[in-house]
Every structure is written in structure tokens, then in C-alpha cells.
Amino acid sequence: MEQFFQFMVHGFDQFFRYTAFPNFTIGHVVMLIVGLLFIYLAIAKEYEPLLLVPIGFGILIGNIPFLQGANLQIGIYEPGSVMGYLYFGVLKGIYPPLIFLGIGAMTDFSALLSNPKLMLLGAAAQLGIFGAYMIALFLGFLPEQAAAIGIIGGADGPTAIFLSSKLAPELVGAIAISAYSYMALVPVIQPPIMRLLTTDKERVIRMKPPRSVSKTEKILFPIVGLILTTLIVPSAMPLLGMLFFGNMLKESGVTKRLADTAKGSLIDIVTILIGLTVGASTQATTFLTSQSVGIFILGAGSFVIATTGGILFVKFMNLFLKDGNKINPLIGNAGVSAVPDSARVSQIIGLEYDKTNHLLMHAMAPNVAGVIGSAVAAGILLSFFMG
């Protein structure tokens, strides 16, 4: 009887050691709360639910603690784990080009083709990338790490993952979480900056209606765009090549099935895999460090700089434009490539000051230009630090 009792005690002790309860840390509790917050913002506030629900649930999955060193192959960082294999697509930069393929297939570049000068706003908003890069260097990050952190300012999650996987794979989780978080919080972060930097008179500027763009122009754009951008920055080929290829599928008119797949089931599947694995990579024992917190703060700074840069550049351009051709600076925020959320914010804030002034189509021009701009910026940084 005594041996049976000892066996039962030992068995229960063994079982208890393998449960989550004795392995909980304060870090796990913090990250579980963060995961629940993401899910709440996605469902209750509808902040980028297609991103925040997978990421938030991934955070929950990644922060159910388990016995370390037991080789259970369940943690995302354990060799041989299923989540680790899925995370491979993030670490090796496989998922981002597939996301860009879908973005290209669902993007209409007509607004940009109609008013090409608005492309400059997409370039101006990349100021956040280089501003954050300088700050990260000042704070002691290695140049490669600083470059990967800076790309958060483009508000482009796939590009952030792609660049950090090449330059600073040890920071992929923190950078990806930061980039996607700020993409989701566009409706919260940008409006105060837009109101602060514009006057009542500027907010009601009416822009000329976009001209009609021919089908020929739409077909030629992905071809010309690919050649011009990749001749300058060949290292951005994986992203820009897939972006323009997806757009060609859309605009050619003869590959509807392929375009529908790229912008539908394919991008949905990859979004699920990215969101879930990026969320799971926030495993508290590995992720929750002062460095990760610093990256999150730097990400906020880069996002603010990018938004500010876009708005101020519009105001600068207006100094040289005649009345009737001036640009409403409320579309300057759309230069960050959170498509289409930042353009939608331009529309919402514009309607607050003039119920009949619709800025959405105008804002889509710098918005899609920002997608190209962030990929070009990533290619430039990659060519500097991979050489």
C-alpha cells in the first residue's frame, strides 16, 4: 500500500510538473493580457481584425507555459515543433512576398496614375524609417538592427518582416509585433497629429477630381514600375516583383482566376500563418526583454515621424502650387503604407470639417505609393548592410 501511495504521489508530481501552473511567470501573465487586449481591440473596436485576431490568439498560444528542457516540441523556438516549422516562413522571409502578391492583385493604382505628383507623399512618409534608424543607432543598436527597426515607420508589416529576417533575425518577433500593432492603431495615432499640423483653412482644401485612367495605362504601369524600381533597387525584387506581378494579374483582364486566388484565398492563408506565428513568437521567456520594449517604443516614434513627414511635405508642396491645384494636407498621412486604413483616416478627418469634401480617392494615391516606397526603402537598406 505504501509503495502504491508513493507511486501515486510521484505520478501526480510528475504530471503537475508538466502542466502550465508551476511554469507560470509574471511575463506569461503580461503577455496573455496583451493577447486578450489585441483580441478586444479587433472585435470591440474593429482595429484591423484580420491582423489582430490571429496575432492576439497567437500570443495566447505562445504564452501557455510548459516545462522548459523537456523537449516537448510545442514551443515555437523548440527544434522540431510544428509552430517552429510554420514560423520558418517568417524567419526566412517567405510569407511577405506572397502578401505583396495579394496586395498587388487587389490594388487599383488609378489614383496614383491620375496624379503622379502624389507619389512624392509616399516617398516623404518614408522619413519615419530613416528617422527611427538614426534614433536606434543613438540608443546603441547595431546598424543592421537599427535598419530593421526603422522599417516599422513604413507601417508595412510584410516589409518589416522581410527586412528584419535578413538583417536582424533575432528581432523579427519584436519588430513584426510592433509593425502590425501600429498598422492596426492607425485610426488612433494619426488623427491627433493631422489636427495638430493643419489649419482650418487647409483642412477644407478641395482637390480636382482624378482624371479617368485608360486600361492601357493600367496594364503598362506594373511593367514600367517593375523595371524602373528594380533597376534602381534590385534587392527589393522579391517584394516589388510580386507586387507588380499581382497587379498585372488584376489589370490584364485575362487572368481573373489567378488574380482572385492571389487577393482572396492565398493572401488570407498567408495572413493567418503570419499573424498566428508572429503572435506565438512573443513567448515570454524569450520575447519579453527590455530590448523588445525599446523596439516597441521606437516603432511608435518612427510612425509619428512618418505621419508628420507626409503632412509637412504637402504643406511644403503647396507653397509652389497655384490655387485650385493645391493638395489637402490631410492626405499626407496616407503616405504610410497601411492600406487602406491611413487613406480611410484622411477621408474621415476631412469629412469632419467639410461633409461634402471626399478625400478617399486622392488619399489612395500616396497610400499605394507608400507601399512601393517602403519596399524601395527596405531594398536600399538591404543593399547597404548585406553587401
Image: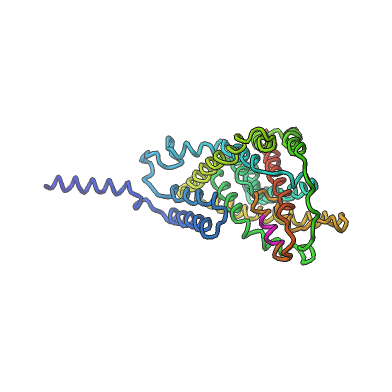
Magenta-colored stretch includes residue 348: yes
Tell me if I can see residue 180 in this picture: yes
Residue 4 percent location from the top left of the image:
15, 45
Q: Quadrant of residue 325?
A: bottom right
Q: Is residue 67 left or right of residue 359?
A: left
Start-end of magenta stretch: 344-350
Front one among 125 and 217: 217
Looking at the magenta stretch, what is its main secondary structure?
helix
At 38% from the left and 44% from the top, the residue drawn is 68
Magenta-colored stretch includes residue 218: no
Tell me if I can see residue 167 in this picture: no
At 69% from the left and 37% from the top, the residue drawn is 251
Residue 174 percent location from the top left of the image:
55, 48
At 66% from the left and 55% from the top, the residue drawn is 344
Residue 234's place in the image compared with 158, above or below, is above
Residue 256 percent location from the top left of the image:
63, 36
Front one among 265 and 135: 265
Q: Quadrant of residue 223?
A: top right
Front one among 161 and 49: 49
